[in-house]
Amino acid sequence: MLFPTFDFLLFFLIVFAVAWALSAQATPRKLFLTAASYFFYGWWDWRFMALLFASSLINYVGGLAIARAGVPRARKWALGLTVALNLVILGFFKYYEFFIASLEGALTSLGFARDLPLFEIILPVGISFFTFQGISYVADVYRGHVTARRSLLDVMLYISFFPQLVAGPIVRAQQFLPQLDRQPDPRRILVTFGVLLIAWGLFKKAIVANYLAVDLVDRVFMDPDAYHSADLLLALYGYAVQIYCDFSAYSDIAIGVAALLGYSFPRNFDQPYRSQSIAEFWRRWHISLSSWLRDYLYIPLGGNRKGRVRTYINLSLTMLLGGLWHGAAWRFVIWGALHGGALALERMLTAKRGATDSQIARGGAPIFRSPMLSTLLVFHFVCFCWIFFRAQDMAVAGSFIGGLFSNWQAAPLLFTPLSIALVAFGVGINFIPRDSLNRVEARARRLPWWVLGILGGLLLALFRAFGMDGTAPFIYFQF
């Protein structure tokens, strides 16, 4: 079930009405929201509802085992076993084919050709996201950030809650579970905030991201050799805008939907293309994932506490695994390795310039003294890395990179006013005042309800009239 569809609108209206009717009854409300979330997930493939339940059960039992363990060693074993079970499930569904194919290729190149068992495995939607949420729960229980839940229902709702289930943001247990203990107040529904976020997300997805995908990006990445170098450069900028608008749109809609149901989600994007360093970019891009990798991988590896060389290794390894999290393909590994190497190199260079560890960790150490030069360099490095992220395989990535410098013979084909305007708009919204949406919300709250209703209807008519035919899945559904 996709957000910008009539099916989801009908589903959400029912969920909204029933959930608030049950606002004074905690357990029935949780039961209903959990059932609705499982229905939402089962809309794609009902068979994976069992996998979602298994993930919840594993982490529920793991949390209780950690809480009841009498000695630190037993707590560590309970945490390690639970995390391992999560990763085994994720690894089987997402990485089995990749590792078997890679092993078979390596054996063949060494003269030990073997027919290894290869199964056609369907990747469950959102498995990376709800697996990381499960790990977050048991890790937070282990660290004492949350108390292990005695109710399986609480853990099931936390892991399956439908707004963020299939593409984030990755909501921490310590952020969400305490909200289940409070009775939601219908008088405090953030209606204007939620509706504005949803509308903004729909605009970015239905108008900006979809048009750029169909009219520019998909065509060029399908056959880079057929297009002028200028077309390739525009498509590269176009993909940077497409993936930003597509993914941030899903996050905005998810946050808005959760707000209308009385729950608060953390911000997931913060104008990433205005960053003046790679570290700052990862403070602003997919914040819930980058902070998850920092807190549950980078810091446990040692972070920056074991010397400079070890810090560079930890940064590189964290981003390498972050790339692999996105997909079982070497192009994602390379994408992660490029970002990891850049973070390590940037930290080395800025440290030599006298930047403190706290400045670097906050992403506050620009690459150059000039903010403009720093932003331009970071943006173009990120765009270059997007080539590996978007290309179908390494051969296409190589053709695209080569074409950027060699295909200058014919005239550009895809330089249309619409594509240029959408690219400029997508980059430009990274530089507007950070509180722009809050300002709009403050003014909208003063309007009568019937005016807001008319404006909402006009926006829906606009999306209907100018949106692409059909509904394209969000990019991060594949992860």
Image (spheres, rainbow, N blue to C red):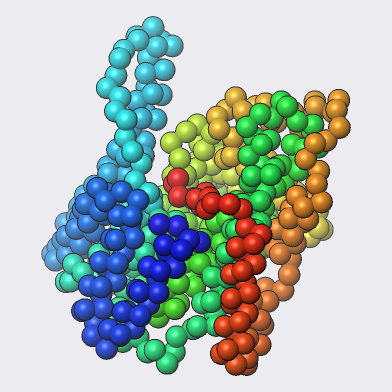
Residue nearer the viewer, 134 or 211:
211
* Position of residue 250 measured from the top left corner of the image (x, y, whole percent): 51, 61
Q: Is residue 198 visible?
A: yes
Residue 395 left/right relative to 410: left
User: In the rendered view of the protein, which quadrant contains the N terminus?
Assistant: bottom left
Would you place residue 43 above or below residue 409 in this image?
A: below
Residue nearer the viewer, 18 or 434:
18
Q: Which residue: 44% across, 89% down?
A: 188
Residue 334 left/right relative to 104: right
Image quadrant in which you'd find residue 390: top right
Q: Is residue 349 visible?
A: no
Q: Which residue: 16% across, 57% down?
A: 74
Q: Which residue: 54% across, 80% down?
A: 193
* Position of residue 333 measured from the top left corner of the image (x, y, whole percent): 50, 36
Residue 281 left/right relative to 51: right
Query: How many numbered tags mark residues here?
Result: 0
* Position of residue 185 measured from the top left corner of the image (x, y, whole percent): 37, 89
* Position of residue 175 measured from the top left corner of the image (x, y, whole percent): 39, 72
